[in-house]
Image (tube, helix red, strand yellow):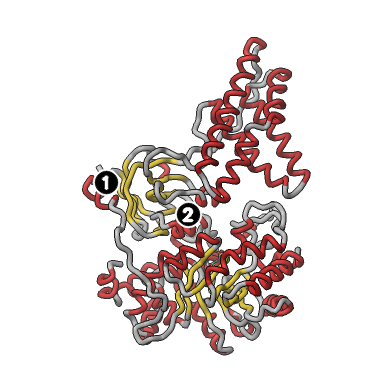
């Protein structure tokens, strides 16, 4: 019998297939002693396990490309490192530890040494722990950590996915994602959307889904069906054959221009944006090139990374965001471990006080990349809270010849005081993911609070309106680059509130463009009033959907 579970819809599309659950974390082995007769066998088992892990990782490295291949090759080399196994072997022989406990303790010692040396070697401590977990899993006969790799397409089910897990997902085999944790603006959600994998997060009851059972998910509606009827499952398995196209120029029915841009983090994303017809880039998340790095990349390396994205957009606008490190995107060379509340801590532009050189060198690299390419580069800072921070950032950009400097509006204070912020900033970009988190006091990583984390929250829409009004005083343009920009029903509301560019995952461009083309600016303003007049996000969305029902039905949205 079918059962239906509900969650937060984060990446549209329907999919059905067998569930594959994420393995539980590898448990720390207990310290128990072997008898002397067991020692030789234990040493042999350790060697076999380490070789099995090395061979598996080497095989995966050969099949992978780019960063994933490099990471896997490094991890494979660690599994084969004689220093690690020799230390573990000594612990088996001298202390008579089980092989799983011996490798656990040996890797702990080595990881500490690496961490003491500092970057870039300290970065390897995490890889070492991964190797340790894989060897222990092999020894005790449990599934290794990370996304499983069965030889058939599947729906991935888990508590939540680490950014590194999500980044290596292959959309050809991962039909859909269902998680019990994670919110609609978590990075799992953002990456699933970018990869075009249907996903529902914060699903109550997802933890009960068993490996192998058939599940159907609708990432647009936020519904997961266990044991669906076979005809419905078969229909969902037919992947969307035809997709709407975007002609590369966003406008409302009366011709008001609304630039439709893409969010990108790397050259592959830039390519996807070009193919989808994006008018440019509204958010280039530079920190993604440096995730997992223990040391600041050299200016020359940064220039090369930025040029790879800028080169795809000759003659077009690219909004480069300076490093947004911290909270869900820690970068060890600018953020500190152990802050009690990292989302409210030293993140985004605030790291520039602690390490001013990092911002300065990044601006130097952006300026050099701008000089070398033909894109129209705008620069913006994340997590701006005050007019003073804005003035400092704009001045720092000007020192590097970067004259179109703006700010992310993602802290409520910045929206409330927009008029004073836009006295300095050339433009603003609403980061609705964080704006929602901070307005609703609701951690964007926490699935349990998904209900609060809607861009349709009237309080959030009030702040969008205030930001646009403050910018209008100085005739400055405001866009949206948070996930809200990809919601085709919300797009006319945002335009009605004064937003004039929307930046989103490339896959959403065509649907957003299609809705805007059918609604004129006056109607957008009426829709904004309807949403603002509602008491809660569900009522706001329903009122707007009802008002433009024929358009949505016509477009199959
Ligand atoms: C946002 O907060 O909406 C945003 C676009 O930035 P990020 O998701 O990278 O924090
Ligand atoms: Mg943000």
The label on residue 39 is none
Query: Is residue 142 shown above or below 456?
Result: above
Left or right? Give the position of 80 relative to 211: right
x, y percentage for residue 535?
A: 40, 73
How many residues crowd around disc 2 within 10 Å: few (fewer than 14), some, or many (20 or more)?
A: many
Up the image or down, 456 lies above or below 86; here it is below
Name which residue lies at 56% across and 26% down.
139
The image quarter in which residue 319 lies = bottom right
Query: At which x and y percent is residue 191?
Result: 49, 57
Q: How packed is label 1: few (under 14 Cα within 10 Å), some, or many (20 or more)?
A: many
Q: Which mark is residue 447?
A: 2
Q: Is mark 2 within 8 Å of ligand 1?
A: no
Asked whether residue 413 appears in the rendered view, the answer is no
SS of the residue under disc 1: loop
Q: CA distance from mark 2 to mark 1?
A: 24 Å
Write the residue at 41% across / 48% down.
174
- Residue 228, given in percent of the width and then of the height, sits at 27, 46
Which residue appears farthest toward the right when viewing the image? Answer: 117
Point out the tag, 2 or 1, that comes first from the N-terminus.
Answer: 1
Ligand 1 lies in quarter: bottom right
Q: Quadrant of the N terminus?
A: top left
The spot of residue 384 in percent (x, y) is 64, 72
Q: Secondary structure at mark 2?
A: helix
Q: Name the mark on residue 228.
A: 1
Judge by depth and name the residue closer to the eye, 28 or 394: 394
């Amino acid at each position: 019998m079918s059962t239906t579970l509900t969650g937060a819809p984060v990446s549209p599309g329907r999919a059905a297939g067998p569930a594959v659950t994420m393995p539980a974390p590898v448990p720390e082995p207990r310290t128990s002693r072997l008898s002397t007769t067991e020692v030789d066998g234990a040493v042999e088992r350790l060697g076999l396990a380490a070789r099995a892990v090395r061979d598996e990782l080497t095989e995966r490295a050969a099949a992978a490309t780019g960063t994933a291949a490099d990471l896997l090759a490094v991890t494979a080399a660690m599994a084969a490192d004689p220093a690690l196994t020799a230390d573990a072997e000594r612990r088996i022989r001298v202390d008579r530890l089980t092989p799983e406990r011996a490798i656990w303790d040996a890797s702990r010692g080595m990881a500490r040494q690496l961490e003491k040396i500092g970057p870039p070697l300290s970065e390897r401590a995490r890889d070492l722990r991964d190797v340790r977990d894989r060897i222990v899993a092999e020894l005790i006969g449990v599934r290794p950590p990370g996304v499983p790799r069965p030889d058939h397409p599947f729906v991935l089910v888990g508590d939540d996915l680490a950014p590194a897990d999500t980044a290596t997902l292959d959309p050809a085999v991962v039909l859909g994602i269902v998680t019990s944790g994670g919110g609609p603006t978590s990075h799992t959600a953002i990456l699933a959307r970018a990869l075009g994998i249907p996903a529902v997060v914060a699903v109550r009851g997802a933890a009960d889904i068993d490996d192998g059972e058939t599940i159907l998910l609708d990432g647009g509606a936020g519904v997961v069906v266990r044991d669906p009827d076979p005809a419905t499952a078969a229909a969902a398995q037919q992947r969307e054959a035809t997709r709407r196209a975007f002609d590369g120029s966003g406008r409302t029915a009366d011709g008001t221009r609304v630039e439709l841009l893409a969010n990108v983090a790397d050259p592959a994303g830039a390519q996807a944006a070009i193919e989808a017809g994006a008018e440019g880039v509204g958010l280039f998340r530079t920190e993604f090139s440096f995730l997992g790095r223990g040391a600041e990349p050299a200016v020359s390396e940064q220039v090369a990374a930025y040029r790879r994205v800028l080169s795809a957009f000759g003659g077009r606008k690219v909004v480069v965001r300076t490093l947004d490190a911290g909270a869900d995107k820690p970068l060890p060379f600018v953020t500190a471990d152990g802050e009690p509340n990292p989302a409210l801590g030293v993140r985004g532009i605030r790291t520039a006080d602690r390490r001013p050189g990092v911002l300065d060198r990044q601006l130097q690299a952006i300026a050099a990349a701008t000089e070398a390419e033909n894109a129209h580069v705008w620069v913006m800072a994340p997590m701006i809270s005050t007019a003073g921070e804005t003035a400092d950032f704009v001045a720092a950009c000007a020192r590097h010849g970067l004259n179109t400097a703006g700010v992310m509006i993602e802290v409520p204070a910045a929206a409330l005081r927009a008029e004073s912020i836009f006295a300095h900033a050339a433009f603003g970009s609403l980061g609705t993911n964080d704006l929602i988190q901070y307005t609703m006091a609701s951690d964007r990583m926490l699935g349990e609070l998904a209900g609060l984390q809607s861009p349709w929250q009237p309080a959030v829409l009030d702040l969008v309106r205030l930001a646009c009004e403050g910018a209008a005083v100085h005739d400055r343009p405001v866009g949206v680059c948070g996930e809200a920009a990809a919601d085709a029903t919300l797009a006319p509301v945002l335009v009605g509130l004064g937003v004039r560019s929307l930046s989103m995952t490339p896959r959403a461009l065509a649907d957003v463009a299609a809705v805007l083309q059918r609604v004129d600016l006056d109607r957008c303003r009426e829709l904004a009033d309807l949403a603002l007049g509602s008491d809660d996000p569900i009522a706001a969305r329903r009122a707007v959907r009802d008002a433009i029902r024929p358009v949505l039905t016509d477009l199959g949205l």
